[in-house]
Image: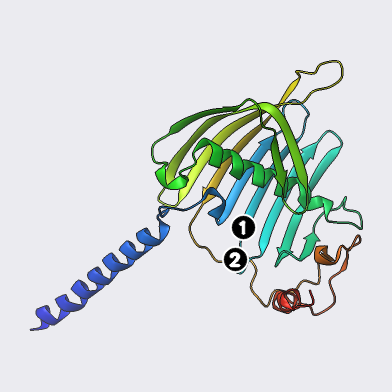
C-alpha cells in the first residue's frame, strides 16, 4: 500500500506539470488574427543609411495602456540614452537623458515614428500578420505612385514614392518573431530629383504577455514629466511622493 500511495502523488504531479506546460504553450502561441502592432515587447534597431544615425529602442507595452521605451541613439553630434514612459497617452515622463532640454516631447518623436513605420512595413510585407510566419519568409514589395505618410499623434513623416521594402521574417519561438527590412524611398533635392535614401530595420517581436517593469507603487520622483494632452511645452520634476498608480488615476480623470 505504501508504494501505491507514493505513486499517486507522482502521477498527479506529472499530470499537473503536463497541463501547465500545455497552458504555457497555448498562451505563448501567436493567435490567428494577431497584428504586428500587437507585440508586447518590440526590440528595434534602426540605421539611417549613411547619415551616421543609429538607434536601438526597446518598447514594452502594458496591458493598462502605458508604454515604456528604453532609448539608445547614436548620431554624429553625440549619444542620447535614457528611458521614456507614456502614461495613458496623456503624460510623458523621462529620466536618464543628460542632454534633454525642458521640452521632453521631442525625445519620443523619433522612436514612436520609427516604430509605426516598422509595423507598417511589416504589414505591407506580410499583411496576414505574424501568425503565418513560421519558416523564414523573403519579402519584396514596391509602391510606384503613393507617398507613404505617418502620423503618430506626436510626430508626422512623409516618404515619397516610389519606395520599396525588402527583407525577411522568421519564427524563433512560439511567441517570438524576428525580422530584417530595408525601406528605400525617394528623397529628392534640387540638384538630384531622383535621389533615394534608405532605412534598415532589424527587430524582435515578443507577443507573450509579460509583467510590466514598473508596479503601481513605483515612485516617480526621479523622473521629469510633461502633459502632452495639455500641450505643455516644458517638463517639471515629478512631485515628491507621486506613484505610478496616482499618476494613472490623474491621467484617467475626465478633465485630463
Mark sitting on residue 60: 1
Residue where numbered disc 2 is placed = 212
Residue at figure coordinates x 36%, y 58% from the top left = 25
- Image coordinates of residue 226 in percent, x first then y, are 84, 64
For marks 1 and 2 on the same chain, the one whose residue lies earlier in the sequence: 1
Q: Marks 1 and 2, how far apart in space?
A: 7 Å
The C terminus sits in image quarter: bottom right
Give the side of residue 184 with respect to residue 158, left or right.
left
Instruction: Residue 72 in the image: state x and y as whole percent.
Output: 73, 46
* Label 1: how many Cα within 10 Å (few below 14, some 14–19, many 20+): many
Question: For numbered disc 1, what is the local secondary structure?
Answer: strand
Q: Are marks 1 and 2 in contact (CB under 8 Å)?
A: yes
Give the structural element (helix, strand or loop) at label 2.
Answer: loop
Give the residue displayed 84% in from the left and 71% down from the top. 238
Residue 231's place in the image compared with 120, above or below, is: below
Q: Which scheme is used to colour this image of the protein?
A: rainbow
Furthest residue in direction front, as rendered: 145
Residue 185 lies, with reference to residue 118, above or below; the image says above
* Front in this rendered view, residue 193 or 249: 193
Say which residue appears at 47% left-offset and 53% top-offset. 34
Residue 92 pos. (x, y %): 78, 62
Q: Can residue 62 be seen in this view?
A: yes
At 76% across and 54% down in the image, what residue appears?
A: 82
Left or right of 81? Residue 177 is left
Amino acid at each position: 500500500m505504501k508504494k501505491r500511495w507514493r505513486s499517486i502523488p507522482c502521477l498527479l504531479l506529472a499530470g499537473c506539470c503536463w497541463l501547465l506546460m500545455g497552458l504555457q504553450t497555448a498562451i505563448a502561441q501567436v493567435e490567428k488574427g494577431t497584428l504586428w502592432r500587437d507585440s508586447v515587447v518590440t526590440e528595434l534597431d534602426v540605421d539611417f543609411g549613411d547619415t551616421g544615425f543609429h538607434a536601438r529602442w526597446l518598447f514594452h507595452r502594458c496591458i493598462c495602456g502605458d508604454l515604456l521605451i528604453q532609448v539608445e541613439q547614436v548620431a554624429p553630434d553625440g549619444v542620447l540614452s535614457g528611458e521614456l514612459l507614456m502614461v495613458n497617452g496623456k503624460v510623458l515622463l523621462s529620466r536618464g537623458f543628460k542632454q534633454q532640454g525642458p521640452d521632453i516631447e521631442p525625445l519620443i518623436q523619433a522612436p514612436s515614428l520609427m516604430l509605426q513605420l516598422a509595423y507598417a512595413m511589416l504589414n505591407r510585407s506580410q499583411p496576414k500578420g505574424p501568425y503565418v510566419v513560421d519558416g523564414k519568409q523573403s519579402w519584396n514589395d514596391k509602391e510606384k505612385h503613393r507617398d507613404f505618410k505617418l502620423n503618430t499623434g506626436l510626430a508626422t513623416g512623409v516618404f515619397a514614392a516610389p519606395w520599396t521594402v525588402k527583407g525577411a521574417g522568421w519564427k524563433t519561438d512560439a511567441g517570438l518573431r524576428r525580422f530584417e527590412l530595408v525601406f528605400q524611398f525617394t528623397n529628392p533635392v534640387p540638384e538630384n530629383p531622383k535621389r533615394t535614401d534608405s532605412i534598415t530595420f532589424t527587430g524582435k517581436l515578443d507577443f507573450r504577455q509579460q509583467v510590466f517593469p514598473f508596479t503601481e507603487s513605483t515612485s516617480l520622483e526621479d523622473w521629469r514629466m510633461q502633459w502632452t494632452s495639455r500641450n505643455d511645452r516644458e517638463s517639471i520634476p515629478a512631485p515628491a511622493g507621486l506613484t505610478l498608480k496616482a499618476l494613472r488615476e490623474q491621467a484617467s480623470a475626465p478633465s485630463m
